[in-house]
Image: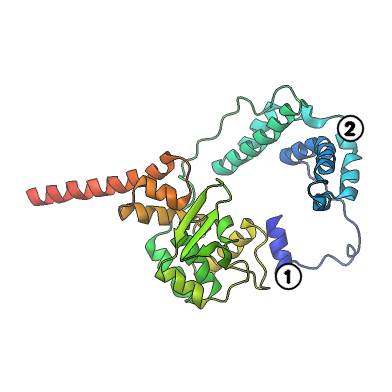
Amino acid sequence: MAIFYQLEDDNDLPDAPEELQGEELNVDNISTLYQAQLAVSTGSIERMVSFVGSVLGANPEAVDKLDVDQAIDEYGDPRNAEGPFADITKAKIKAGLDKRAKTPNAANNFLKTMSHMFKWAVDAELLEVSPCSGVSKLKAESDGFHTWTVEQVEQYRAKHPLGTKPRLAIDLLLFLGLRRGDVAIIGKQHVRNGVLSIRTGKNKTWVHLPIFKQLAASIEATPTGDMAFLTTEKGKPFKSSASFGNWFAKQCDAAKLPTVCRAHGLRKAGATIAADEGSTAHELMAMFGWSRLEMAQLYTREADKKKLARAASERLANKI
């Protein structure tokens, strides 16, 4: 949906066929994930209405989150009448994994989403056992997002000069090491005495990041929004991390970079460069907001391997 809204914002959506213009459309989806979402809709609507009612006293604006017309339509959907949870079996979950076997990470994300959904169903006593129980993740050979090389960073920056929003975007991602969702919302209000402080969206951990000369120059040279450094072409903050990620992907494509070069890979590149330059695991944790030491040690161990291999090669070369 984030991609749809981004296309809508950019006016890139084609006009509907003439015979459909002005007509109300009902679109059905038969995927396993959609059916699971549909299965929880009736119960979740009841709970949401109850919850909204309970918090109105503290926050009257909460009622704005409830779309009454949509809730009534979904509650009256005949597919909710028989409790379709039972229709989603372990076999169907495994079939969903098999369907995505060529992209293991996507398959595992599917399993993760379904597991969370059915955990809720079990907790709500709508099911006794989750169909995801006992289903194993697929082995993924990839180590995740591509880590940018220094050459790729230079290629991007050569395309997007100082003073442009695409240039500021990569500078913020690289020099601060924040996730794209955090980069999309940071602004001048987060900076005091040359230090940017923010509670990260994913781990809810406070990080305090110094803004050094190169990044300060990039911020100073670029027109920024009132509450966010980075804004859309219309001057508004990005609606979500996904919309920012889609926009950043376009800037990478404009620089003729490989399609694997995306926002998250810059966070990995920053951690790799910092570790190679001698940063300790605890220093990396402080900068990147990691709560587990093991994550930081992945980068320091790799950096140590490089140093040890270089030292061994030098000793061998000197001996021979």
Q: Position of residue 206 (x, y in %)?
A: 52, 50
Whether residue 258 is visible here, answered yes or no, is no
Relative to 236, 273 lies left or right: left
Name the residue that disc number 1 marks.
11
Q: Tell me which residue sits at (42%, 40%) in the image.
A: 293
Seen from the viewer's position, the closer of residues 230 and 85 is: 230
Numbered label attached to residue 81: 2
Q: Position of residue 314 (x, y in %)?
A: 15, 51
Q: Which residue is at a point 47% across and 44% down the rendered structure image?
A: 142
Q: Quadrant of residue 47?
A: top right
Position of 317 compared to 259: left or right? left
Hey, what amino acid is under mark 1?
Asn
- SS category of the residue bearing label 1: loop
Q: Residue 89: which quarter of the image? A: top right
Quadrant of image for the N terminus: bottom right
- Give the Cα separation between the discs numbered 2 and 1: 39 Å
**Residue found at the very far left of the displayed protein:** 319
